[in-house]
Amino acid sequence: MSIKNSVFPIRPNTDLQAETHSLFIQSIDWVKESWLNILIAAGIAAVIVVVLHAARAWAMRLCKRRDGVTGWPGILGRTISKTGNFFILMTAIRLVSAPADMPLTLERIVMFLFTIAAVFQGAIWVREVIFGLIERRTSADSANGEGLASALGIIRLLVTIVLFAIAVVTVLGNIGVNVTGLIAGLGVGGIAIGLAAQGVVGDLIAALSILFDRPFRVGENIRFDNTTGTVETIGLKSTRIRAFDGELHIISNRQLLDKELHNLTDRIRIRLPFMLGIAYETAPETLDRIPALLKEIVEANGAAAVRNGFSAFGASTLDYELIAEVPSGDWNVAHPIRDRIATAILRRFAEEGISFAYPSQTTFTAAPDGKLIMPYPQPR
């Protein structure tokens, strides 16, 4: 943000004392010649100041509404409430400078001061809007505690530094300073810092992505790679996951986002797979009844058989696949149902005379004359 023509250019060879004396003389003559215009302009300026102060007071009350500072009215109110007195004063003076018929030099000074006030006030407003949007986005994650507070603190610091750096460069550009070298130096310095701390910066950006995109939150159950557990803390560099066996897994935020994540808390159903190996000796008529038996068992235990039937001819088994769906995402509910289904299958198959196959081996021996002796009776 730069203005091509400076509002108050620096002239290093100007005699400051002479200019100050000239400004004093011009001001005296201006007061003598335009005292009525000055009084009228002062009255208008006072009204403007009162109106702007009233707007700021209204904004402060808006912050206290029931939707809080995270609602849109709250964000707007907090932004306006950060309006500074210097900006209010310079705005009023700038608006009445033309009706007051100010001398050119004095008008340049007013324009210069108004530019400084406007630039820094704009930076403050933008900062408050950004803070409000961030807090609105992360308000549901207040359980994050220290990690979220640290992240928001760093965001505030970075946003403040960037905005006020832009404001300083803008002001310097408007008073005639060549800021090209300064901008280039800041760019090179930023690149150097980024390369030196790319690991930390990468984890920080990943932490902010987790906080804003919310693939998971504190207290939710997730599965990452070979780790399954409950999220305890989302930090600036790492996330801590308490596994179901009690171990605490500390995983880099960047690594978390590089791989597929499974959020187990948001699931609405759980499917329980069973693979049953039936002996080849089972009669075909009995095999025909197996799908109906399995469906009956599953439904009797409060689940639904979404897949049920013959799967494949195994090396030593007839494979039947059963998938039971539990209408709940809570594993504490699904686990007992799985146990009841398993024991019910064993009990029902024993009643029906259906045998499960298991790995077995048959040994054949031979008589002295070389004739095979079968291990089971031969039909006559």
Image (cartoon, rainbow, N blue to C red):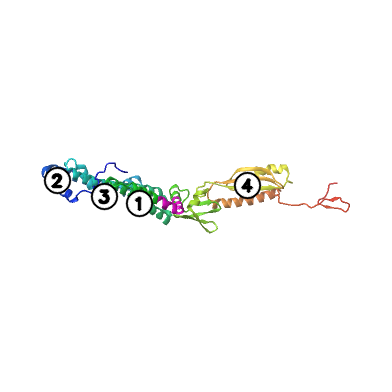
Reading the chain from its start, which is encountered first: label 2 or label 4? 2
Instruction: Give the residue at x 43% y 51%.
Output: 194
Which class describes the residues within 10 Å of circle 4: few (<14), some (14-19), or many (20+)?
Answer: many
Gap in angstroms between the C-alphas marked 2 and 4: 102 Å
Residue 195 position within the rendered picture, expressed as x and y whole percent measured from the top left: 44, 52
What's the amino acid at mark 1?
Answer: Ile
Residue 233 located left or right of residue 364: left
Q: Give the dominant element type of the magenta stretch: helix, strand or loop.
A: helix
Write down the residue under mark 4.
Answer: 297
Write down the residue under mark 3.
Answer: 84
Which class describes the residues within 10 Å of circle 3: few (<14), some (14-19), or many (20+)?
Answer: some
Reading the chain from its start, which is encountered first: label 1 or label 4? 1
- Contact (CB < 8 A) between labels 3 and 1? no
Residue 156 located left or right of residue 318: left
Gap in angstroms between the C-alphas marked 1 and 4: 66 Å
Residue 266 position within the rendered picture, expressed as x and y whole percent measured from the top left: 50, 48
- Contact (CB < 8 A) between labels 2 and 3? no
Magenta stretch in the rendered image: 190-205
Reading the chain from its start, which is encountered first: label 3 or label 4? 3
Write down the residue under mark 2.
Answer: 26
Gap in angstroms between the C-alphas marked 3 and 1: 19 Å
On residue 87, the disc is none
